[in-house]
Amino acid sequence: MVIRDFLRWIGTAPASARADATNALARAWLHSRLDPIDRDAAEAAMTFLLDDPAPVVRAALADALGASSRAPRHIILALANDLPAIASLVLMRSPLFLDTELVDFAAAGDVEIQAAIALRPQVSAAVSGAIAEVGAVDACLELLANPGAAICRGSFERLVERFKEDSRLRCAMMQRPGVPLAVKQKLVADLSETLAMMPFVRSGIRSGKVENVVGEARDKVTVALAGEAEDHEIPGLVEHLRLSAQLTPTLLLRTVCSGNIRLFECALASLTGMPRTRVAVLLDSAQVTSLRALFAKAELPRSTHSAFVAAVETYRVMRMRGDRLYGHEFTRRMIREVLARYHGAAGQDDLDQLRGLLHRLEGEAAREAARHFVHGALTAA
């Protein structure tokens, strides 16, 4: 009887009052102890309210039922096909949807629908994959910001392919935990290529030097990424670098001079096909003949061998005397000792080919150390 009175009343009540009553009815259906007859009548009334001409009424229904696992499924599905603002209330929260349904809604919906799905408390890898494939960039940003979203490597790679030129997505990818290191490095490499083609970059750097400058910047970020990575991530990064022809002598020299010996070991293991443990033994021994054979097997240019021998021997000496093997000061000391130790080696093996890089690395380390010192001094003051 109460439900009949309610249905008669909503025929003349204003929209705001209908919305409040609808919300109360839905919450009573969810949480009150109704007898079977009243419960069925209330469900029929809610179904009837799906056709209410006022969006605020349907939104009130979606707000009340959206997060419940006990909500009538046919009502939730109907609301999900309503206006985006209403559909979002259930698509963002309802546990009743199947993954296949969410994938379909993401494929057919606008950015508001896609973003609502991306913001669900838990998003499966399949649904994340659909959003990565067809979602608007704003929806993909919501997905990346959601710690409850399971995103597989293929989806991360697809996001890079689609939106690598969007600075917001690049930042979100770099900041999200769990993004494969190889994917982050690809973002860096793609950005480097884009920068190299920009007119203001090409006009500000002498002809023929753009690729070198941009390449060194890419290598610098790559080594920094590797330095912050877990050990199990390094082989995947190295494989990506090898397949994309980025395991260059300049990258490897920067790696060892920065103290990232695990990346250096893994790179040489990949280039030579030798076990990483064997490479580690050879580097630790620092025997010149063995090192030159190792670098030759890795197909590094012979003219670079002296530089690498110098770097490996210097690293070993610094480690044995207990020096700190990381940081800007380490890099400065490392490069100074390499250059001093092999000052006369140019005539033997063309060390001059990489001497310029070593000096640039030394300059970078000096500037970073100065920035760190000034920041510390200002903070202390």
Image (cartoon, rainbow, N blue to C red):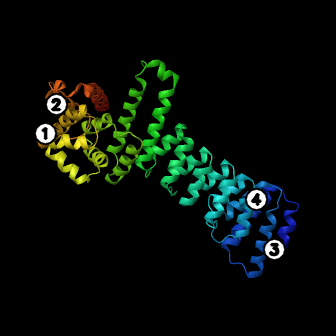
The residue shown at (68%, 74%) is 32
Considering only order in the chain, which callout, 3 or 2, is on the residue closer to the N terminus? 3
Graded by Cα atoms within 10 Å as few (under 14), some (14 to 19) or many (20 or more), the crowding at tag 4 reads: many
Instruction: Give the CA separation, mark 2 to mark 3.
Output: 90 Å
Contact between labelled residues 2 and 1, with CB atoms less than 8 Å apart: yes
The residue shown at (31%, 33%) is 250
Image quadrant for the N terminus? bottom right
Instruction: Give the CA separation, mark 4 to mark 2.
Output: 74 Å
Considering only order in the chain, which callout, 1 or 4, is on the residue closer to the N terminus? 4
Q: Looking at numbered disc 4 in the image, what kind of residue is underneath it?
A: Arg
Q: Looking at numbered disc 3 in the image, what kind of residue is underneath it?
A: Val
Q: Position of residue 75 (x, y in %)?
A: 73, 66
Seen from the viewer's position, the closer of residues 89 and 233 is 233
Q: Position of residue 163 (x, y in %)?
A: 56, 41
Question: Going by the image, does 321 lie left or right of 144?
Answer: left
List the residue tagged with mark 2. Answer: 337
Q: Looking at numbered disc 2 in the image, what kind of residue is underneath it?
A: Glu
List the residue tagged with mark 1. Answer: 317
Q: Which residue, as the protein is rendered here, is positioned at the far left?
A: 321
Q: Position of residue 314 (x, y in %)?
A: 16, 36
Look at the picture and state if 6 lies above or below 309.
below
Instruction: Give the CA separation, mark 4 to mark 1.
Output: 74 Å
**The residue tagged with tag 2: helix, strand or loop?**
helix
Residue 195 is tagged as: none
Seen from the viewer's position, the closer of residues 272 and 69 is 272
The residue shown at (18%, 37%) is 309
Look at the picture and state if 32 lies above or below 325.
below
| Occupied quadrant, residue 308 | top left
Mark 4 or 1: the one toward you? 1
List the residue tagged with mark 4. Answer: 58
